[in-house]
Image: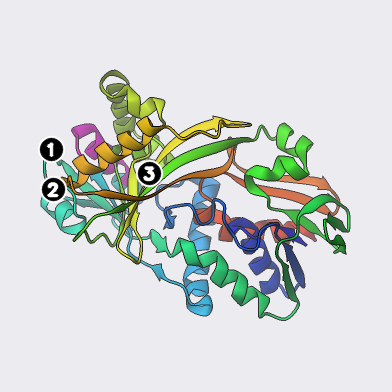
C-alpha cells in the first residue's frame, strides 16, 4: 500500500512493480497537484553529493526508461550554470576539477551565450552539466500513474482521503484497505497522518513563489542555474568560490539571501519559462504571497536575459517538506514506513530512493 500519488509515492509503486509485488496507491485528490507538478521539471543530478547523488544517478536511468514506456518527454539536455563574477566561476572550476569533464564542462562567455539565451553583460563564463535531465513535469505524474494502472496487480484509488494507518491497514474515508506493508509518501502533509513521526523528524513546510513568463523568441533547451543556485545545491555550495560569493551577497545583495532565492529557469513545451524561486519555512506558513518576492524574481530574470518584454502568465506557490536532512525514512511500526524527500529534490532522487526503501521492507 502506498499513500500518496505524487512523484515519491509513484516511485515506490514503480519499484514495487519492478519487484513483482502487487500494489495499491491511495491518493486524496483526483490527480497530482502538489510539489510534483509545481516544480521546474529539473533532474539536478551533478550538483548533488553523497546519498542524494547516488539516488539521482539511479533515478536518471529510470526517468529515461519511464519516459519511453509512459510516453512523456524526458530531455537529456543538461544544465547551464551561469557565472557572472569571478567567485562564481571559481566555484564552477572547483566542481569541474572534482568531477571531471564527463560531468562538468567549463564554458567561455561566448560558449555560455551560445548554450543559453543570457545577456553577455558582466558574464564571466559558465559550465554545462550534461547529465542533468529536463522532465515534462506537468504531464509526468499523470502519465506514470496511467502506465502503472495498466500493469498487473496495480490499483490506484483517486479522491480517497487516508485517515489513519497501522500494520496491515489503511483507513480511508471510503473504508478500510489491507496490505502487507504500508509506505506513507504524503510529502509536506505527513503530519496530517503521522504527526508524531513528522515532529520527531523536525519537518516543516517550505513555501516557494514561482512564475510562468512569456518570453517571445527565447529558446532554452537546458535548465539554467545562476550564482544563487550555487548557494543551495550542495556540490557547489561546498566550494570556496560559493563561500566568497555568499559573503559578497551578504554585503551587497542581502535581499537575495533573505528571500532564500534560487534563481533558475526551465522552458515549458509551450515556450513559456518557469522561473523561481524564493523560500519561506514554517510548520504552518502564512497563506499570503509576497509581491516583493515576485518583483525580485522578475528583476533578476530581466537582467539575466537582457529582456524587458517578459509577461507574467501565472504565479503560484510551490510547497515541499523540509527538515535538517535530505530524506526522512522512519519505520513507524513493523508494517508501516514513512518516507519523504525533505530537501526539495524529489524529482531528482525519488526513483533512486524508492528501490532502497522497498527492498528494506521485506
**Local crowd at mark 1 within 10 Å, few (<14), some, or many (≥20)?**
few
Secondary structure type for disc 1: loop
Q: Is residue 25 placed above or below 83 in the rendered structure?
A: below
Q: Please give the residue where the numbered disc 2 appears in the rendered image.
A: 109
Q: Is residue 192 placed above or below 217 in the rendered structure?
A: above
Secondary structure type for disc 3: strand
Disc 1 or 2, which lies upstream in sequence? 2
The residue at the point 26 percent across, 43 percent down is 301
Tell me if residue 343 can be seen.
no
Given contact means CB atoms under 8 Å apart, are the residues at marks 1 and 3 in contact?
no
Q: Nearer the viewer, residue 173 or 148?
A: 173
Report the quarter where the N terminus lies.
bottom right
In the image, residue 6 lies at what x, y percent? 61, 58
> Nearer the observer, disc 2 or disc 3?
3
Q: Please give the residue where the numbered disc 3 appears in the rendered image.
A: 276
Chain part drawn in magenta = 84-95
The residue at the point 54 percent across, 72 percent down is 143
How far apart in space, not on screen, are marks 1 and 3 (Cα)? 22 Å
In the image, residue 120 lies at what x, y percent? 11, 45
Disc 1 or 3, which lies upstream in sequence? 1
Query: Was residue 93 drawn as part of the magenta stretch in this picture?
Result: yes
Q: Please give the residue where the numbered disc 1 appears in the rendered image.
A: 122
**Local crowd at mark 3 within 10 Å, few (<14), some, or many (≥20)?**
many
Quadrant of res 161: bottom right
Amino acid at each position: 500500500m502506498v499513500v500518496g500519488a505524487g512523484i515519491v509515492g509513484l516511485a515506490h509503486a514503480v519499484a514495487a512493480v519492478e519487484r513483482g509485488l502487487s500494489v495499491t496507491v491511495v491518493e486524496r485528490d483526483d490527480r497530482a497537484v502538489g510539489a510534483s507538478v509545481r516544480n521546474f521539471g529539473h533532474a539536478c543530478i551533478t550538483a548533488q553529493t553523497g546519498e542524494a547523488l547516488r539516488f539521482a544517478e539511479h533515478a536518471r536511468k529510470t526517468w529515461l526508461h519511464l519516459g519511453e514506456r509512459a510516453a512523456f518527454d524526458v530531455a537529456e539536455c543538461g544544465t547551464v550554470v551561469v557565472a557572472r563574477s569571478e567567485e562564481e566561476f571559481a566555484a564552477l572550476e572547483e566542481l569541474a576539477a572534482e568531477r571531471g569533464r564527463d560531468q562538468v564542462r567549463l564554458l567561455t562567455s561566448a560558449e555560455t551565450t551560445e548554450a543559453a539565451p543570457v545577456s553577455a553583460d558582466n558574464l564571466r563564463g559558465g559550465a554545462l552539466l550534461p547529465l542533468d535531465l529536463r522532465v515534462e513535469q506537468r504531464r509526468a505524474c499523470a502519465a506514470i500513474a496511467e502506465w502503472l494502472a495498466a500493469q498487473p496487480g496495480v490499483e490506484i484509488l483517486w479522491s480517497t482521503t487516508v485517515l489513519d494507518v497501522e500494520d496491515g491497514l489503511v483507513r480511508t474515508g471510503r473504508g478500510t484497505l489491507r496490505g502487507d506493508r504500508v509506505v506513507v509518501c504524503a510529502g509536506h502533509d505527513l503530519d496530517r497522518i503521522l504527526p508524531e513521526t513528522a515532529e520527531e523528524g523536525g519537518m516543516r513546510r517550505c513555501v516557494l513563489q514561482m512564475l510562468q513568463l512569456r518570453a517571445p523568441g527565447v529558446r532554452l533547451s537546458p535548465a539554467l542555474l545562476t550564482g544563487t543556485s550555487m548557494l543551495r545545491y550542495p556540490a557547489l555550495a561546498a566550494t570556496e568560490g560559493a563561500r566568497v560569493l555568499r559573503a559578497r551577497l551578504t554585503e551587497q545583495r542581502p535581499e537575495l539571501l533573505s528571500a532564500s532565492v534560487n534563481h533558475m529557469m526551465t522552458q515549458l513545451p509551450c515556450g513559456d519559462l518557469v522561473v523561481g524561486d524564493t523560500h519561506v519555512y514554517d510548520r504552518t506558513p502564512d497563506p499570503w504571497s509576497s509581491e516583493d518576492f515576485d518583483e525580485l524574481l522578475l528583476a533578476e530574470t530581466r537582467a539575466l536575459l537582457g529582456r524587458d518584454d517578459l509577461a507574467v502568465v501565472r504565479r503560484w506557490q510551490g510547497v515541499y517538506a523540509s527538515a535538517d536532512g535530505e530524506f526522512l525514512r522512519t519505520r513507524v511500526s513493523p508494517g508501516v514506513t514513512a518516507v519523504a524527500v525533505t530537501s526539495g529534490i524529489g524529482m531528482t532522487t525519488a526513483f533512486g530512493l524508492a528501490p532502497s526503501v522497498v527492498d528494506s521492507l521485506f
